[in-house]
Amino acid sequence: MLDKLFESLYLKVFVNIVIKEKSILVYIEIHSKKGVIDNVQSEFETLEVTEKMIDFIQGYIKESPYFYISILDNSLEQGALPTCKKNDFALYYDISSCEYKCYEKRWTYYTSKAELYTLEKKFSELGVDFIFSPFLIVENFFQDKIKGSLALYALVEENFISLAIFEESKLLYAEHIDIHTKDEDDELFLVANTNDEEDLHLDEQKDGIDLEDIDIDEDDELEDFADIEDLDSIEEIEEFEESKDIEEELLESDTVFDEPDEENFNEDYQRFIAIQSSINRFYKDERYESRFIENIYIADSVSVSSDFKKYLEEEMFFNVYIRHVEIEAELCELAKEELGL
Amino acid sequence: MKYSYIKPRKKTPFTPDVMLIVIFFSITIIMLLSTYFFLLFKDYSFEKERTKLLGERVVLEKNIAKMDKQISFIKEQKVLAQRVFTQNMVLKDSITNLFDLVPERITLSRAELLKNGLILYGVTPSKDVYNFMLQAPLRSIFQKSYTSFYPAGNGWLNFVSTNYIDNDESEELDSED
């Protein structure tokens, strides 16, 4: 009772920390009872917690005892499972060394306990109040779409892609991919399913990518899809195009694209490969209900190039909708939801 | 802990600095209040004692008045007693004088002391003995003296002597006392 009274008297400060590839982004939002009073963000070109960062954050958290520091979980060993039953977890993943939480009794997200501990230790000088899974951002960001028919939803960060397949709010498949380290696994996966020639092509990709390689590679990959679903059904895509909503999404996504440069192009290609191999796993793994994916919604935090969209559309015959996402703001929304604001 | 993997730290506005200030002020307020209540209590007890003492004073004043009355009564009694004592002394002296007055040859059988007179009964061997020996001193004391004789069996005479002091003189004597 007294706590609530004090809480209502003070401002609330939400500190949201997103660890990127080479920097740490700190986004701070100050709330009063009426709403957002101020927000500020700063990016620190380091992966360590520096004095400068601590000073910056403490400058704001000194204003109120009610401050909440949220961090987006960036551990490699994390993911989501399409069940909330403890007995069924083992079917998908051994989560004995993981911390997990069930989302609205529909699906479960997990992360490695050791990495949580490392993250907490890293920010021990500031302290951490919330650690959120990127899958929560996917679910929150695409809340309006997830209730609909089967589609793939992906949150694209600089290093990672958090990918989830939902059908009418039901999670079918989810994967958290590190686009830089996952390559080798993908290759292994592809080796197991393709012939030696493809393997050679992929090896070349590691050193540098050119469009010729991509074309050859993706043509072969598409054969895999043909085995699973009848691609003739692509005609149905026309139906989607009639929808206004989709047109809007396409327009939005066009504006987001940056001019492609060598580095972006490379990264986007890696992302494409990661998504492609992940979808392959979904189709091939018997544990998951294999259903043909037509739509892919991408929450883009890094401004992917138009080529990325083109690959997905042309090579995998997806309807691609890209929405720009401010991860730090979404993180802040999660923190607010957590507190019931 | 709806979505987050970890629990948020407990948030409280009572930082160590705030706690120090709060403790300082609360101790000060407690001390002030306790002093206030102590004074209130003391005031109350003094007031109670005052009423009690006032009551006692009234009782004592009453007692003093009573005692004053007793003292004045005792003083009056003392005065009275002294007067009675003095009168008795006077009376005793006068009786002693009276008996000294009576010669040996005359025997008194009865004497009546009146307020302003004296009546004597007795026997005398003769009228002359009486007239010389008793009549003379009695006359010097009393203004009026009457004596009557009647014979006794053995030849002696019984006598009754009635003596009075004049009223005016006796009053004067009284006023002198």
Image (spheres, rainbow, N blue to C red):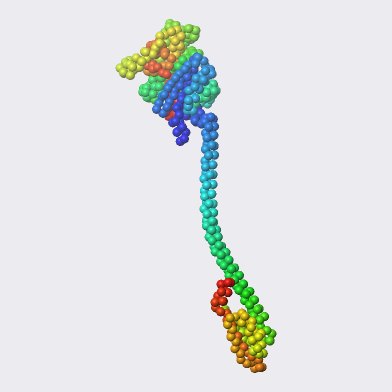
Left or right: A80 in relation to B76: left
Q: Quadrant of the C terminus of chain B?
A: bottom right
Measured along the vertical axis of the image, is residue A65 above or below residue A255?
below
* Residue in the foreground of this view, choosing between A36 and A117: A36
Q: Residue furthest left?
A: A242
Measured along the vertical axis of the image, is residue B42 above or below residue B65?
above
Measured along the vertical axis of the image, is residue B79 above or below residue A76?
below
Residue at position x 40%, y 17% in the image: A324
Residue at position x 51%, y 19% in the image: A53
Q: Residue furthest right?
A: B104
User: Residue A30 falls in which quadrant of the image?
Assistant: top left
User: Residue B109 falls in which quadrant of the image?
Assistant: bottom right
Left or right: B123 in relation to A252: right
* Residue in the foreground of this view, choosing between B15 and A282: B15
Residue at position x 40%, y 15% in the image: A225
Measured along the vertical axis of the image, is residue B38 above or below residue A230?
below
Residue at position x 40%, y 22% in the image: A141
Please state the horizontal and vertical placement of residue B107, each as a whole percent of the image: 66, 86
Please state the horizontal and vertical placement of residue A127, each as a whole percent of the image: 52, 24
Please state the horizontal and vertical placement of residue A235, each as a whole percent of the image: 33, 15
Please state the horizontal and vertical placement of residue A270, each as a whole percent of the image: 46, 12
Left or right: B156 in relation to A283: right
User: Residue B132 falls in which quadrant of the image?
Assistant: bottom right
